[in-house]
Amino acid sequence: MKRELGTRTFKDGNMMNLDVKTLDKIVKNTLSAVEKGKAQIFEIYEAARNEMENVKKDVERVKQEAIYIIFHVDELEKKERRARLRLMEVSRNFTVYSEEDIKACYDEAKVLQVNLAVAREQEQSLRRQRDDLEIRLKQLKNTVEKAEGLVSQVGVVLGYLGSEMDNVVNQIESLQQSQVFGAKIIKAQEEERRRVAREIHDGPAQLMANIVFRAEVCERLIDIDVTRAKTELKDLRGQVRDCLKETRKIIFDLRPMTLDDLGLVPTIKKLLETIEERSRIIADIRVIGEEKRLDSYVEIGLFRIVQEALNNVEKHSEARKVKVVLEFKPGFVIVVVEDDGKGFEATAKTDNASFGILGMRERMNLLNGQLIIESAIGKGSKVHIKVPIA
């Protein structure tokens, strides 16, 4: 099944008959209501975020107290063992030691046992507090993310309703198209910012916070247990490497530097290698014709379309193999992305529902190219891209 993705034209004769003042009043009232709703949602977001920051501080405080009590328990256990051994020795040699010595040993062992029991109870209490706080922190994060998403969506609605309202009667058809396109761009920008922020928060930021925590543990262990400190430092080095790897991945997703330095083909090869490592999908690339550098906007546009197609393969297709074919011809370049996954019905409803496909189509329109998708249930999918070049 083939479907060519072009620009849709929105026409509605009833819209042309609307009175401008009535439409302007409707828009203003709608904008006012949405603005109030946005302010209320933002207040909820701010309150949840502030509480989340306070809980974070409590989590760190409890962790520090837990570290201290753990070391304190270790010290008490050592002292308690020594006291018991001393008491056993005194008890066996009661003829050598006086009754006062035996009583002193017994009292010392008893006090240490009580202190150890109290310290262990404190340790368990701190662990429970930490677990409860971490559960609370997770719930607050979910609330903050949902509120953030609502604020973003309301912002998109405001931008959609408030843009290009001048000359609404004479420009209604083109206005509808530009609003839809503008809203998609705004949403794409907001989604991209949220994605990058989430990746940095969940990746490098979390790793660096853990690195700081582990470094503090190492500082405490150096003077107590050198072997354990070395083990912790080894783990710490692995976490630093993971942090660096995550940071490089985010940089590559934002703007692969190989695209400017080496061109389209090496960058796609790097992307395929990353997909192989991440998802175990067997990825292959084939270049037909003489490889050459293209205009910068063409290279980045083609790369983003191929990247989105490969993202769909990795996330949704359940494919085992994916192949990218680049063919350089006089006057244009052809790219085909083909997988052996479960496929889908490439209907108009599917195309409109898929934000990724809409983004690919919009980029293709900017490049004055052609995008065709072939797919059927159980037969994989194939994306054909054809772009004119100078």
Image (cartoon, rainbow, N blue to C red):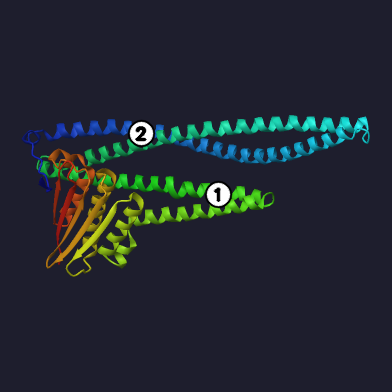
Residue bearing the label numbered 1: 212
Q: Nearer the viewer, residue 269 or 296?
A: 269
Give the percent coordinates (x, y) of residue 211. Answer: 53, 50
The disc labelled 1 sits on which kind of residue? Val
Mark 2 and mark 1: span between their CA atoms? Answer: 37 Å
Residue located 26% across and 53% down the image: 307
Please give the label number shown on residue 39. 2
Q: Nearer the viewer, residue 166 or 324?
A: 324
Placement of the C terminus among the 4 image quadrants: bottom left
Is 30 above or below relative to 159? above
Q: Is residue 85 visible?
A: yes
CB under 8 Å between discs 2 and 1: no
Mark 2 Cα shell of 10 Å, populated few (<14), some (14-19), many (≥20): few
User: In the image, 331: left or right of 221?
Assistant: left
Give the percent coordinates (x, y) of residue 169. Answer: 10, 39
Mark 2 vs mark 1: in front: 1
User: In the image, 303: left or right of 76?
Assistant: left
Placement of the N terminus among the 4 image quadrants: top left
The disc labelled 2 sits on which kind of residue? Ala
Mark 1 Cα shell of 10 Å, populated few (<14), some (14-19), many (≥20): few
